[in-house]
Image: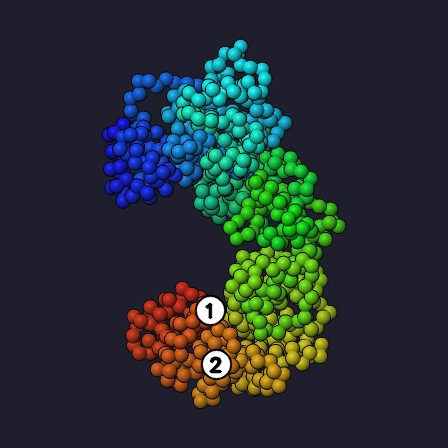
Amino acid sequence: MTELGSELRRRREAAGYSLSRMATAVYSSKGHLSKVENGRTRVSRSLAAAYDHVLDANGELLALVDGQANPRRRRGLVGLPEHTRHFVGRAPELAAIASALGSRPGVRACVISGLGGVGKTALAVAAAWQAAADFRDGCLFFDLGGQGPHSQSTTETAHHLLGALDVRKDLIPDDHGGRLNLLRDVLRSRHVLLVLDNVRDAGQVRPLLPAEGPGRAIVTSRARLPGLDDAWHVPLDVLDTSLGQSLLRAVLDGSTEVEDSDAEGIAQQCGYLPLAIRIAATRILHGGWEPHELLRRLSSASTRFSALNEGDRGVAATLAVTIDALPANLRALLGALSLHPGPVMTTSAARALSGLDHATTDLLLDQLHEQHLATRTTDSRMRLHDLVQAYAFQYTHPDERITTSMIDRLVDHYLDVTIAADALLEPLRFRPPHRASEHSEPPFDDAEGALKWLRATWPALVRTTTLIDDDRCWQLALATRGFFFREKLFAAWTSTHQQALVTAAGNPHATGMLLNSLGMAYLESGRITESAEHHLRAHSSFVESGDEAGATDALASLAWARLYQGCAEDALRDLTIALESYRHAGRERNVVITLRGLAFALAKLKRHHEARAAAAEALDISSTPVDVMRALNCLAWAAYQEGDLSTARALSTQAAEMTENEYELARALTSLGNIAARAWDEAEAARLWSVADEHAVLNPAVVWETSARVQLS
């Protein structure tokens, strides 16, 4: 024992692990490992396996434990099922279970919980076989029936356990309390591992767990079983992308060629759920389906679950066991959540869908989380598994009238919160008047929180525009424009606005705003001809609606497109007209933007003094950090064009020292790289350009600094 402990210490130290670091890696305590390595405590097989995994010992440490002579060892009943040969991944979970069974003080049970089909039983069996040699009195496996019709009572299971532990039938009491007392007494002296699979709830299994002594238990359940607070909990998630494809190929075992794109798509459509992936693989192996045809069926909501069903097992049937057993109020909430456009939502969005008050919704969400039907994330969001959402949408879907009211509440919520977020990020931007609904609950109170919310929520906002055909569609699209511009999300920007144009038909004012915004999206993405066309159409719509301010906006936006088309004189003319209108109307931020446009047009026309004056004025009256960065970059470009590289360097350096906007930071760094290149410092230019590329991708068609970089390089 001492020699084996010394070998563990030698291997650990050779790998550069401190005792504290190793304790963390194998889920044990520093004190316990010290006793093991100094020979004062036996090295369990599970601990050796954990060391083996962390130190990449390729089974050598495990073999040393298996080679230890133990004359007292006898062999009890080993009733474990066969370990599947298609077991992939789960190394961290196996290490955690090994530690819980062998070296974590005071822990006698390990709970593996997760969604039906996620692989809990396979993991429990793998962990039990790995630890079996440490339990000389046997390893017993019992299926407790879960939430199905064959769910066992605690008394029944205790009877089966006592029989498997060689207790004579005539000594087993008939009453509930008597059986449990006898079971606890027997377990107190037995080196036995119990695998209690498919547990319904904590009450079903708590009295069966070893209370003290050398016995241990592995429990699996679809519920998290928080009531077993003395146990070590291992929540099991679906496989990652790589392991999902690995499992598919492992089951196929090389018998069928699958293109990488098909393998990736099949695993994704299976939600990376092991049961679904296994069924998909058998469909290919034994069902005569080509991978591409299977992927087509999995991609359709109408055939997805039928494709994931094969005789005695199916994903829909597996999910039904849990979902059909839910109380009516939980099923109703799950059906409401299934309507959400995407699997991730804030708890506020969940409340909007449910129509329930805060306390009730949060309580029900906690219960769905406990059943692994929804998962609370660290940022106060809820996540539904893809297949859970699809099943709930198909089988617990509320009627059309209720669905409509749920969607209406969700749309109101997202519209209100998006407008609130946009107002915090761009307080000076003009936006149409809006009256918030009763479902407005912004989960943030500052610009930083608003930006974080938008970055996490924007895919759902894009999908939400497809759910409605009234004015809220174009209002939501316009509310996202500032964020899409900031993040350069051009595909989302254009798709939401094209959808919104349909709902704005007959409203020339709304149509003008959408067309003008679309023109900006096309301009920013380098599609300059389309940009000019949309700005011209926007101008016509604004004129039709009698909106002079809108017509001025379209004229100014068209001028920017003309500038990038090389028509600097036309751009200068229209920007001058727009500037006069903005000054007269007191639209200060539009004055700032237009002055920058004038500076670029004047620089293009080599009217350098006027260009620098316009840019300097824009800088003087800029009131937000981002506008200051833009004005500094504009003024630096005017100086660069005039050949005043010293001033250009100073201005670009000042802009680069600000961190409010990645895009403008990349422009400043690109400018500094250009200046270095002009000074023949190619190494410094390459370094600065490389750093700029890390912050943002700049399109040379619409970014003057990048255009100059292309010429220099």
Residue 304 visible in rendering: no
Q: Determine which quarter of the picture holds residue 654.
A: bottom left
The foreground one among 27 and 273 is: 27
Q: Determine which quarter of the picture holds residue 367.
A: top right
Quadrant occupied by the C terminus:
bottom left
Q: Is residue 533 above or below residue 283?
A: below
Q: Is residue 153 above or below residue 672?
A: above
State how far apart marks 1 and 2 are (Cα): 16 Å
The foreground one among 381 and 632 is: 381
Residue 296 picture location, percent across and down: 57, 45
Residue 71 picture location, percent across and down: 30, 18
Q: Is residue 27 above or below residue 713?
A: above
Label 1 SS: loop
Answer few, some or many: residues within 10 Å of disc 2's Cα (few below 14, many 20 plus, some between 14 and 19): many
User: In the image, what residue occupies the spot 59% across and 35% down?
Assistant: 318
Q: What residue is shown with label 2?
A: 619
Residue 147 visible in rendering: yes
Label 2 SS: helix
Residue 222 picture location, percent across and down: 55, 36
Answer few, some or many: residues within 10 Å of disc 1's Cα (few below 14, many 20 plus, some between 14 and 19): some
Residue 115 picture location, percent across and down: 55, 38
Marks 1 and 2: CB-CB under 8 Å? no
Q: What residue is shown with label 1?
A: 660
User: In the image, what residue occupies the spot 45% across and 21% down?
Assistant: 187
User: In the image, what residue occupies the spot 63% across and 44% down?
Assistant: 364
What label sits on residue 426 in the rendered view?
A: none
Q: Residue furthest right?
A: 401
Residue type of the residue flagged with mark 2: Leu
Residue type of the residue flagged with mark 1: Glu
Q: Residue furthest top?
A: 170
User: In the image, what residue occupies the spot 62% across and 81% down?
Assistant: 552
